[in-house]
Image (tube, grey):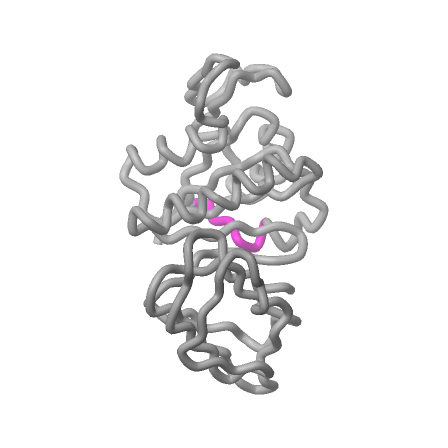
Amino acid sequence: MKKCVIVGGAEIKEKAYIKSLLSKEDFYIFCDRGLDHLDMVREVTGRDPDLSVGDFDSHREPSEGEVIKLPREKDDTDTFYAVKEGIKRGFDNFLLIGMIGERIDHTLGNISILLYLFERGKKAVCADDYCEMLIVGQTPEYIEDSYQYFSLLNVCGTAKDIIIRDAKFPLEGGEIKPDYQYGVSNEVLPGKKACVSVGEGNLLLTKIR
């Protein structure tokens, strides 16, 4: 499935891993400083950005590809604007890279985009040097035993009827609230695929590589 790749400006060290998630057929939106990763993406696609958005306060405005220049003072971050633009252009599958960095406020804001996309029926994964993150709800999500750990964190409301199977710490009909995050650092049983789902509400699933 052709996906919309949103490229942020956070540091990417594991370039080989991130490149393995990319495809020539994907649509690439670079967010301001995300253009620092253009050479990495070009190694996969061999082409200019499909779209660049931002106020370009941390990177020069590009001369290649389509550009949407935003004002510096605005409600949406450059990344959030890019996601909305991807939805407007008809994409249902999103990959966010370069999103997890030193600025915890930007990091949390970017993680919240996963919830925004989930609530609009879109598939979305945020990948960094160490993990993959996505929102899980009623549709079961399966986790390979190649992941060292996985965690389920509450980022909104109360999650109920949580099911975790084929894991070191299984759960049937559990509940997790934002003020007690006991779903951290679970492990897939060797040779199995863990299965997680949430009957009511949703959780942030983090799969640690």
Q: How many marks?
A: 0
**What secondary structure predominates along the stretch shown in magenta?**
loop
* Residue found at x 48% / y 44%: 112
Between residue 89 and residue 108, name the one nearer to us: 108
7 w.r.t. 143: above or below = above
- Classify the position of the C terminus by image quarter: bottom right
* Residue found at x 63% / y 55%: 17
170 w.r.t. 159: above or below = below
Between residue 2 and residue 59, name the one nearer to us: 59
Q: Determine the residue located farthest toward the front in the rendered image.
A: 179
**Percent coordinates x, y for residue 30 in the rendering:** 51, 31
106 w.r.t. 140: above or below = above
* Residue found at x 46% / y 36%: 28
**Percent coordinates x, y for residue 78 in the rendering:** 49, 26
**Percent coordinates x, y for residue 173 in the rendering:** 40, 78
The residues colored magenta run 19-24
- Classify the position of the N terminus by image quarter: bottom left
Residue 113 within the magenta-colored segment of the rendering? no
Question: Which picture quadrant has residue 88?
Answer: top left
* Residue found at x 67% / y 40%: 101
**Percent coordinates x, y for residue 11 in the rendering:** 69, 39
Question: Which picture quadrant has residue 87?
Answer: top left
